[in-house]
């Protein structure tokens, strides 16, 4: 018998993956393609706080930012369905967030090789966790800690290295329907 307590999965599509995996760029494109709303959890937090993620990390620390991510997910769980949501790269690390993601919708992991991430992130200065040099090593260490989490949280895994957005869309749409 179905438990009354069990919450039904909402009909959103959530993109997870490492910084630079293309969650925001592909997410915007996908939302447009599917005529869905787009939401990026970093932008959601920045709008609410009136400052950038980088400023939040500097002024309030990473833990405060992680609490803001959890709060954003709770709010999105209470919002209407039909969104493509790009989740910040570290968001699935917290166990509570993984359970909220499960309620929020269908989770797609955008898998990207470390060489490709280094290429995409080498001139970025917006991500506090990658600041201060040693980019390749930072990516390697964070990925070692996170890859299993991304895989375990995802309903499907899409490799982004050699795929066009249209090919990625076909793989997502086939599984999402
Ligand atoms: C982070 C990823 C960033 C942002 C913050 C922390 C992470 O989002 O939330 O800098 O811990 O991986 P993107 O994945 O959108 O870059």
Image (spheres, rainbow, N blue to C red):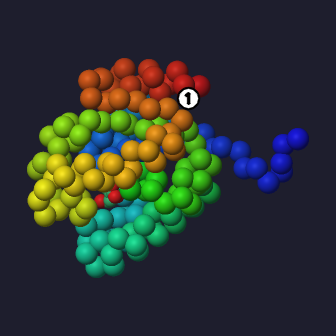
| 10 left or right of 31 in image | right
- Image quarter for ligand 1 equals bottom left
Give the camera-side residue of 86 and 113: 113
Query: Which residue sits at x=59%, y=53%?
Result: 99
* Residue 46 visible in the current orientation: yes
Give the camera-side residue of 115 and 109: 115
- Looking at the picture, how far across and down is residue 76, in whole percent? 55, 55
Give the camera-side residue of 24 and 102: 102
Residue 158 against residue 134 in the figure, above or below: above
| 27 left or right of 176 in image | left
- Looking at the picture, how far across and down is residue 10, in whole percent? 63, 44
The quadrant of the picture occupied by the N terminus is top right
- Looking at the picture, how far across and down is residue 110, in whole percent? 38, 37
Residue 80 against residue 52 in the figure, above or below: above
**What secondary structure is marked by label 1?**
helix
Farthest residue to the right: give it.
1
Residue 172 against residue 31 in the figure, above or below: above
Query: Which residue sits at x=51%, y=42%?
Result: 152
Q: How many marks?
A: 1
Query: Which residue sits at x=35%, y=36%?
Result: 111
* Residue 35 visible in the current orientation: no
- Looking at the picture, how far across and down is residue 83, in whole percent? 51, 43
Query: Which residue sits at x=37%, y=20%?
Result: 167
The quadrant of the picture occupied by the C terminus is top right
Crowding at mark 1 (Cα within 10 Å: few <14, some 14-19, many 20+) = some
Quick check: is the Cβ at mark 1 less than 8 Å away from ligand 1?
no
Q: Which residue is mark 1?
A: 176
């Amino acid at each position: 018998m179905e438990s009354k307590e069990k919450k039904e999965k909402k009909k959103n599509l959530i993109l997870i993956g490492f910084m630079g995996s293309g969650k925001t760029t592909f997410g915007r494109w996908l939302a447009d393609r599917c005529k869905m709303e787009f939401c990026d959890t970093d932008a959601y937090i920045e709008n609410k706080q009136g400052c950038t993620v980088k400023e939040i990390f500097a002024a309030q620390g990473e833990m405060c930012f992680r609490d803001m991510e959890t709060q954003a997910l709770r709010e999105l769980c209470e919002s209407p369905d039909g969104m493509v949501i790009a989740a910040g790269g570290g968001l699935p690390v917290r166990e509570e967030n993984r359970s909220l993601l499960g309620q929020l919708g269908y989770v797609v992991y955008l898998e990207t090789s470390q060489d490709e991430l280094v290429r995409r992130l080498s001139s970025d200065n917006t991500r506090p966790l990658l600041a201060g040099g040693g980019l390749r090593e930072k990516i390697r260490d964070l990925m070692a800690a996170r890859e299993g989490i991304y895989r375990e949280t995802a309903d499907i895994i899409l490799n982004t290295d050699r795929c066009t957005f249209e090919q990625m869309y076909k793989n997502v749409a086939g599984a999402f329907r």
